[in-house]
Image: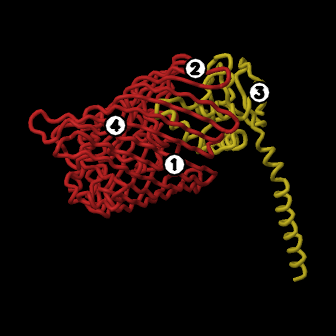
Amino acid sequence: MLSALNNRYRFKHRLYATVAGGMMLSLPAQAVELAENVDVHGFVSQAYIDTSANNFFGQSEVGSFDFRELGVNGFWQVGPNLNFAAQVTSRNAGRESDSDPRLDYGLADLHFYSESGIQSGIRAGRIKVPLGLHNQTRDAPSARNGIFVPASVYFDQFRNALVSTDGVALYTGFSNSWGDINLELYHGESDPGDREMEYYVFKLDAPGHFDDASLQGAQLRYESMGGGVRLALSYTRPSLDYVPNSGFDPLGGGDVISDMLLYSAQYNVSRFSFTAEYLLMINNVKNFGPAFPDFRAKGKSYYLQTDYRYSGDLSFFFRYGKQIVNDKDPDGIRFTPSHVGFGRTRVVGAQWQLSSNWLFRAEYHKTNGTAWLSGADNPVLTDAARKWEIFALQAVYSF
Amino acid sequence: MERQLYRTKPQTTSIIRAVCLSVCLCPIYGWAESSISVIAHPEVAVQSLSRESVWSIFGMRTRVWPNGQKIKVFVLDTDHPVHRQFTTDVLGTYPYQLNRIWKRLVFSGTGRAPVTCSSLEEMTLKVRSTPGAIGYITVQAKEGEHHVISVE
């Protein structure tokens, strides 16, 4: 059985392994500088996930190697005021993320400095969405704060709509003796993915599909000099139109508009980092017809994380995360099953930075509730377990 | 027995003395160790920078010199003792903070990471030969011609 699985795995991912192996053999420890003004970076990650029940990032109930990531990016500084940047990623994380390569970002960035030190610019193309402390790097394994971004706040149902968007961002910022202030405003369109939004809204795979999400938002960031204190206030408004199936569809052409307000704070000292992020989310679901009455729900979620750096290369963290899908129904009584209405999790993790390229992680999650469980990987949510555990390992190579 | 006691006493005294001495000298030693100099390419017209400007440059936010020339930032490897010293003494932060900032820039398409040098010799050579370059060295390595930028 194990060898059959191994063979399948080897066959399916030979190309992937070749690319990854080639990269590791041929690349130096740091970025590859193709020319004076061009940098190339990349990453490869492979995880092993075993869950006591429920499928997370693949068929994890039987132990899975399904979660792996591959990414390559380039940055071209054309002149002092203009640069181009692009990243292609391949992410395999269960049914919603197959390993097909996609353009994660591809943008032109034009920026200017004023005499008073204010830097302003415009980015256009496919841009990363600034939301909280981690959204922009949620798919870059070496830049994350664990094997998975904190699921209570960065839940995967909105991942595709929020990970990057095709549009424009305006930004401005300045530094002085008490820190840096940055403001970014953006507008764009993004693909919400195949099924995850449908499971999020209807708790089932609907006959029709959600069209591109329209996204508007802003982020205000403060960082003290040296990064000891980091604060961010992020707002984003994804709105999605449902396109009913042209054959039979009990659902009408409704829409889902969400207002997300995310407060982030981090305090860093030599050995410890304390992080808290709190998300307030208002979902407006309208015009789906009699089969699915309109509703408005306020969701609340947060996580608290403490990181302890034992040494330069070994660190540990503890995280508590909580999500309530509808604040009027914290125990999910009106949900079927009730446990999709909430999630509470405790996570302990360890991280070992073997070298500047290699990173190894181990995590244990103990979770009550299935609010952030993927519907695509667990299509019969009534069969999902309310209490479940995750044991996960991850190896990351990045340059 | 008497001999032993006699021998023990100076030992204890010397330990106490050593501890006292090192405690007293710690700030001085720390100061001596913190003699890191920020250096730039000889043609960079800047003579001094504020600490926040240095933080902004090594955080890769300030990308051009006042005359509009591109800044090229050189650093040593994260676990190099001189990099640690530069990070704590000049920038007032920790290497993990710079790594976090650089990784965010590199993997979100919003900026670049600095060029990492494997040794102080390489750093010296690259800063001297790359127009618009900035880097750092220890005072001990401050031999020959360097365009040292004072940090205020």
Marked residue nearer the N-terminal end (1 or 4) = 4
Q: Amino acid at mark 1?
A: Gln
Labels 2, 1: front one: 2
The quarter holding residue B75 reads top right
Q: Residue at x 65, y 32 (%)?
A: A175
Tell me the subunit letter for badge 3. B
Labels 2 and 1 positioned on one and the same chain:
yes
Labels 1, 3: front one: 3
Q: Which residue is disc 3 drawn over?
A: B48
Label 4 with label 3: CB-CB less than 8 Å: no
Q: Which residue is disc 1 drawn over?
A: A353
Marked residue nearer the N-terminal end (2 or 1) = 2
Label 1 with label 4: CB-CB less than 8 Å: no
Tell me the subunit letter for badge 2. A
Which of these two is toward me, B106 or A299? A299
| Image location (x, y in percent) of residue B101 | 56, 38
Marked residue nearer the N-terminal end (4 or 2) = 2
Q: Which chain is red?
A: A
Q: Amino acid at mark 4?
A: Ala
Q: Amino acid at mark 3?
A: Ser
Labels 3, 2: front one: 2
Residue B3 has which mark? none
Labels 4, 3: front one: 4
**Whole-number angstrom distance, CA of label 1 to CA of label 3:** 36 Å
Q: Residue at x 36, y 61 (%)?
A: A367
Q: Residue at x 30, y 52 (%)?
A: A373
Q: Amino acid at mark 2?
A: Phe
